[in-house]
Amino acid sequence: MSAAAAKGCPDWKGYRMSLKERAEKYRQSLEHKHGWEVELECGQCGYRGMPTYTGWTPKYATGFGKSPTIFAVLKCARCGSDLEAEASSKLVKMFSEVEIPHANRRILVSFMVYALAMAVVAVLVAIFAGGLWWLVPLLLLTPSCMLIPLFNKRVASIRATCECGDADYIFMGMLGRAYCFRCSNCGRLLKLRD
Ligand SMILES: [Zn+2]
Ligand SMILES: [Zn+2]
């Protein structure tokens, strides 16, 4: 306990630190293992095989609908051409038909139901109560925003297991706002939304 806390003052520094640590833990639990383990055909030289993976680049503008976003930096193993376009179309081919698992759907639906219920209560309070009661909707909506990390963590926990018993999911990219994974051990495809 710091001196400030001992005196009965809120220990803001300590509080901030623990929030930072918690945020870091949270980030780690959601962290993806980037990579690429499927063959691609080079549009330049026609070579077909495993591309050279040289890391990944962060991209913040994720696509809409079903447009693919590839984070992996992939080069042709023969001529060195950039294979982002090839990887994009491969991702669409591989994951378009993959369904989001039931467990993931349940989490999304339960969050939406909760947020909707809160919003309805908030609106009712705003309509039927006067004065400063208009503050109540804000207070009711805040916890539902705080629940988002919890829901995201539950979604992330889905990729902790695989049918092969040894889950090792490689993040291949995004289709729209869905995350596309492939188990390195058994090749199982997994598409998640959070
Ligand atoms: Zn090539
Ligand atoms: Zn597996």
Image (cartoon, rainbow, N blue to C red):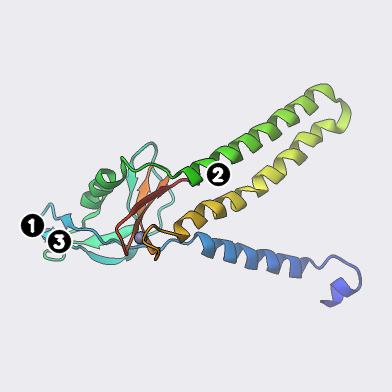
Please provide percent x and percent y for residue 69: 34, 48
Task: State whether residue 173 is above or below residue 34.
Answer: above
Q: Which residue appears at 32% of the width and 45% of the height?
A: 68
| Mark 3 secondary-structure assignment | strand
Question: In front: mark 3 or mark 1?
Answer: 3
Q: Nearer the viewer, mark 2 or mark 3?
A: 2
Label 2 to label 3: alpha-carbon separation:
38 Å
Residue 35: x and y in percent read: 32, 63
Q: Which residue is mark 1?
A: 45
Q: Which mark is residue 107?
A: 2
Residue 185's place in the image compared with 193, above or below, is below
Q: Which residue is mark 3?
A: 49
Does the closest atom of ligand 1 sit within 8 Å of the Cβ of label 1?
Answer: yes
Numbered mark located on residue 89 in the image: none
Residue 6 coordinates in the image, percent (x, y):
89, 74
Between discs 2 and 1, the one toward the N terminus: 1
Q: Quadrant of residue 127?
A: top right
Q: Nearer the viewer, mark 2 or mark 1?
A: 2
15 on left or right of 100? right
| Quarter of the picture holding the N terminus | bottom right
Q: Residue at x 71, y 45 (%)?
A: 143
Indicate the amino acid at tag 1.
Cys
Look at label 3 and name its amino acid: Gly
Q: Amino acid at mark 2?
A: Ile
Classify mark 1: residues with Cα within 10 Å, few (<14), some (14-19) or many (20+).
few
Taking the spot 58% from the left edge, 49% from the top edge, the residue there is 151
Q: Residues within 10 Å of mark 2 (few under 14, many from 20)?
A: some
